[in-house]
Amino acid sequence: MGNLFKTGILLAALSCLLIVIGGAIGGQQGLTVALVMALVMNFVSYWFSDKIVLKMYRAQPVEESQAPGLYRMVRGLATRAGIPMPRVYVIPTETPNAFATGRNPQNAAVAVTEGIMRILDQEELEGVVAHELAHVKNRDTLTMTIAATLAGAITYLAHMAQFAAMFGGGRRSEDEGHSGGGVLGTMVMVIVAPMAAMLIQTAISRSREFAADATGAQIAGRPWGLARALEKMDQASRMAPMEAAPATAHLFIVNPLSGGALSSLFSTHPPIEERVGRLRAMVAA
């Protein structure tokens, strides 16, 4: 419940930031544009994000006859989780990873890479699949789609403001009486708003990852399988990072992107050490 409340507060903050930047850039008209943009982007994301991301990673649907072990595992864990059987996909890459997508449990899909099925044992793979089904059960796929869409809308508005400021839009807005501080105020907004949106989106994603770890461990019935899987996947991803778009990195169970200290600040995933520590604490409890 704590994680859910925190997520709600962060989503509200992201929505408020969108309204603030829309109003600061163009007054009432800018606010209207921001709200319409958010609604349109959310509508498209709600209905088509799963198809887009599955196609992006060339995920192939599999039937029970093609991968009987994986299919039975997903079905059994979905039954334990109390959700409908999701569609199952395999991504043709050796980097071990997985994600869930879909607007609700009735339209969900779970995708795993070829590599993850090679390096994980039965308990570890169960832990990963249970984690992804926890995202479906908790409706995190929808939550993160909304968060990513709002953050994207804020960044797009900031770019529009930058373009307008270059051609004197900030001065015109000031003359019309609805500037957020003229050119200087606009440029500050251009820099600060996208960073703030990214940090809020990151906080939402990390909160949902911790919740999915805990729920997934309960679904699988043992936390240690997921703990070992996270350690293996993290090591493998560091050695051979996956070719992934930053906009979809939050979907994966471990961050598919590599980076240094600065990028870790904006990472959509909590540190693996902290996730593993929490899972091992569940065993000791």
Image (cartoon, rainbow, N blue to C red):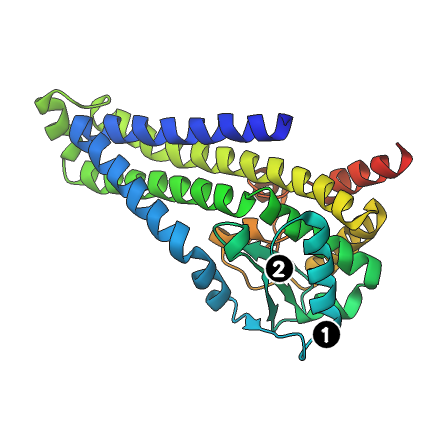
Which amino acid is tagged 2? Answer: Met
Give the class, few, some or many, for how many residues have Cα within 10 Å of label 1's Cα (few <14, many ≥20): few
Q: Nearer the viewer, residue 49 or 68?
A: 68
Residue that label 1 marks: 68
Q: Residue at x 72, y 65 (%)?
A: 116
Q: Residue at x 36, y 45 (%)?
A: 42
Which amino acid is tagged 1? Answer: Pro
Q: Residue at x 26, y 31 (%)?
A: 22
Task: Name the residue at the right extreme.
Answer: 284
Evaluate whether residue 159 shows in this view.
no
Q: Nearer the viewer, residue 211 or 252?
A: 211
The x, y position of residue 200, in whole percent, is: 49, 33
Task: Name the front one of labels 1 and 2.
Answer: 2
In the figure, 166 relative to 183: above or below? below
The x, y position of residue 65, in whole percent, is: 67, 79
In the rendered image, the quadrant that contains the N terminus is top right
In this picture, residue 153 sits left or right of residue 144: left
Task: Name the residue at the bottom extreme.
Answer: 65
Q: Nearer the viewer, residue 252 or 85?
A: 85
Q: Residue at x 24, y 22 (%)?
A: 180
Cα distance between the residues tagged 1 and 2? 14 Å
Mark 2 and mark 1 in contact (Cβ < 8 Å)?
no
